[in-house]
Image: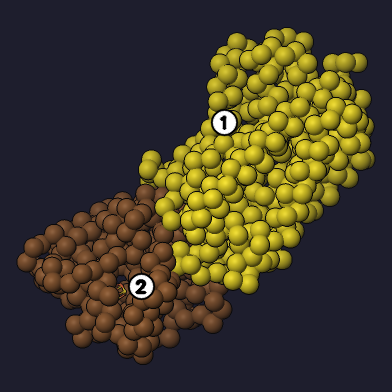
Amino acid sequence: MKSSRRRFLKLAGIAALGLGSRPVVDAAYAAVGGQAAPEPKVGRQPEALTAKQWAMVIDTRRFESAADMEPLIEACHSIHNVPHFENKRHEIKWIWETEYKHAFPGKENDFLPWEVKERPYLVLCNHCENPPCVRACPTKATFKNENGIVVMDFHRCIGCRFCMAACPFGSRSFNFRDPRPFVAETNKKFPTRMKGVVEKCNFCAERLAEGKMPACVEASDGALVFGDLYDPQSKVRQVLNDNYTIRRKQELGTSPAVYYIV
Amino acid sequence: MLEFAVKGSKRYWGLVLALAAIAGVGVLTWLYQLSFGLGITGMSRDVSWGFYIAQFTFLVGVAAGGVMVVLPYYLHDYKAFGRITILGEFLAIAAVVMCLLFILVDLGQPMRMLNVLFYPTPNSVLFWDMIVLNGYLFLNVVIGWNVLQAERHGTHYPMWVKPLIYVSIPWAVSIHTVTAYLYCGLPGRHFWLTAILAPRFLASAFAAGPALLILLCMVIRKFTKFDPGWEQIQSLAKIVTYAIILNVFFFLCEVFVAFYSNIPYHMDSITYLFAGLHGYDAYVPWMWTSIIMMVLGIILLVPPVTRRNPMTLAAACLLVFFGAWIDKGMGMIAGGFTPNPLHEISEYIPTAPEVMIALGVWAAGFLVLTVLFKIAVSIKEEVRA
Ligand code: SF4
Ligand code: SF4
Ligand code: SF4
């Protein structure tokens, strides 16, 4: 049952949903006080967006302050049922803002232009083309789907956190306690998680499957560009062609698929 | 032979009950952790492995260290160790049991543990670690049991055990090598990203394991009618001496590379552990204590006078064991995670429940050890009588 659900997930390209074994999953959700997912559409939808490797370009010049990023972060965290914890140790985040020196350690420079150094930077999972987290996972609960997205099967994850040690970008969070009471408003179209599993940005695989762009991209008013890295006609490639971009810790060879125009 | 486990003096039962009680409190605390989640520990998004995995790493070393009595006896025909190989093997069993328990208590979803078998993933080092650890446990149980039974009946152990013994020797090296590979193959964790990690782990293993064995032999000498032998203890002491010197040497090599090259990310974790970084310095006193203990241990072990004196030898073994424990059981994991990949610092301090669970696992392991040693010693006494 598990493996057929998994194959289905891969086929539909909507990993996080866990719909293949719906009755079981529903029962499990009900049992632990969560909500059941709505009636799923089975199989790949004709409107689904596909790519060889989805990629993102972030135009950091478009963000002047943390307030500019708030709507994007909020969009992601609310539709994905990301809980909010006061205790910093239990923190879970899929996309967040940080300083230049934290986003690009090793690329600091005392004499950078003031606005480059002071501007906030968005960081999220890079959906690396050569992801060390996938290499490390002992159960294939973290895997690369056929669109190049590094997705997670929350129902398979054993919570060993090897992937967190392996990720050189700090992109992953662990559910140190039951997250459900800490989700302000549950989005019933996306599963909530249980304690003891890891989670992270999934490049909105569930939205792409319905033909929609990622939520943060949609909320960014063009500051974030999303597309197929290996389609020369894609918007991402145009932007990469026209701008000098950098990536986080490129030297580690993980080949991040999130690019930054600085 | 199990009957020896239930026939014992008051002192034996007192020890068994005390250990069982501590283990029981550990189990209760673990149940609390199961219901709340790993949030009861000091771990965080930034330091996502802590005390449990550190104990695990240290104990893999103790388990591997057991081979230091098996190897000289079977490969070099060093007859004196024949008397104590069983102690080395039983120590390895208890240590591996603790390792497996530490992995168990560290999992976020332990009920799904078998997913590692249902979806075998050869590209994950954790998958291999599971294989080598369970394999090593199996080998030591089969070998230890058969050899001991043969000794009791005054016969030779079955011939099929011999190849298993030979396999167990490189296997012991493999458990600690694979455990080091869990860490040293991860990009971006500069403290671990070093080819010398596996050799360093082995060196500290071959120091801490035999040091503990010497202490255990001394206890057995004192409290039972079986004498593991002074010559045996002295040979083990020489092994501890070389191994702890190598361990300190490997560490100094790390320090040289990091600070002469002056590459920030190689220096940061070491600076954090030994001097503090950006005002965070909880580990500084511990790490210096560790270094001082190991160096004092060397000073006591190298001169034959102090090595041959039971009192100073015992002190040296304690210093080496606890020095290596701080080095690996505390600094190695927290240090590797600090600073985090974004170069921020979240200081990790284990919580009381976390330490209680860890104590419970240690007690469970020493319970296994006590019972196994009791069986072994009773049989040795019986054979001698
Ligand atoms: S950023 Fe981290 S979590 Fe995301 S794919 Fe790369 S290694 Fe994996
Ligand atoms: S925590 Fe889950 S996703 Fe991460 S390595 Fe372990 S099983 Fe895989
Ligand atoms: S791509 Fe989707 S999941 Fe990832 S940060 Fe943006 S909104 Fe969140």
User: Which of B350 and B326 lies nearest the eye of the viewer?
Assistant: B326
Q: Quick check: B285 left or right of A235?
A: right
Circle on res. A123: 2
Query: Residue A202 occupies which quadrant of the picture?
Result: bottom left
Query: Residue A183 occupies which quadrant of the picture?
Result: bottom left
What amino acid does circle 2 point to? Val
Q: Is residue B337 above or below residue B299?
A: below
Q: Position of residue A166 (x, y in %)?
A: 43, 55
Report, in whole angstroms, how far the alpha carbon at label 1 lies from the one at label 2. Answer: 41 Å
Q: Is residue A228 above or below residue B78?
A: below
Residue shown at the point (63%, 69%) measured from the top left? B280
User: Which of B219 and A61 lies nearest the eye of the viewer?
Assistant: A61
Q: Colour of chain B?
A: yellow
Residue shown at the point (58%, 18%) measured from the top left? B166
Q: Chain of mark 1?
A: B
Q: Secondary structure at mark 1?
A: helix
Is the Cβ of the residue at disc 1 closer than 8 Å to that at disc 2? no
Q: Position of residue B118 (x, y in %)?
A: 40, 45
